[in-house]
Image (cartoon, rainbow, N blue to C red):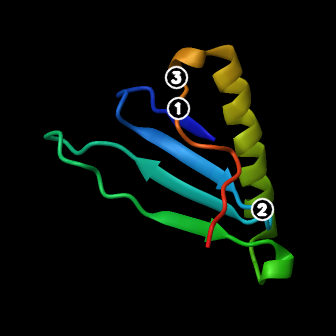
Amino acid sequence: MKRCEDDSPDGYLRVIQGPDGDIYVSVHGRGRYGDPFATTTVRFCTAQGGGHSRHTLNALRELMTAMKEDCEGDPSSVAYGEADYVEVP
């Protein structure tokens, strides 16, 4: 799920769930002078995958639901081009 930020059409939050249930979060955007904004993706694993952040994982799932509802209510802020579920090596 991708959702554009409020201040720029170039920035967005990306939250995806892999087929194993792990959640990946990344922030994308542009720097102050239009240079590409460095992005980093972090992963929160399920308990079966060795995860230690059960509450964070649940909150990220709720965030994905909220982002989907926002996109349905205001499609102008949808960041297109990514699937909700992706194959992650």
Report the Cα–Cα distance between label 1 and label 3: 9 Å
User: Where is residue 82 drawn, in percent x and y?
Assistant: 57, 42
Residue for point 55% across, 47% down? 14
Label 3 CA crowd tier, 10 Å (few <14, some 14–19, many 20+):
some
Q: Quadrant of the C terminus?
A: bottom right
Counting the numbered discs, the total is: 3
Quarter occupied by residue 1: top right
Mark 1 nearby-residue class (10 Å; few <14, some 14–19, many ≥20): few
Image position of 83 (left or right of 10): right
Classify residue 23 as left or right of residue 41: right
Where 82 sits versus 68, above or below? below
- Mark 3 secondary-structure assignment: helix
User: Secondary structure beneath disc 1?
Assistant: loop
Say what amino acid the circle numbered 1 marks. Tyr
Residue 84's place in the image compared with 66, above or below, is below
Q: Which residue is mark 2?
A: 19
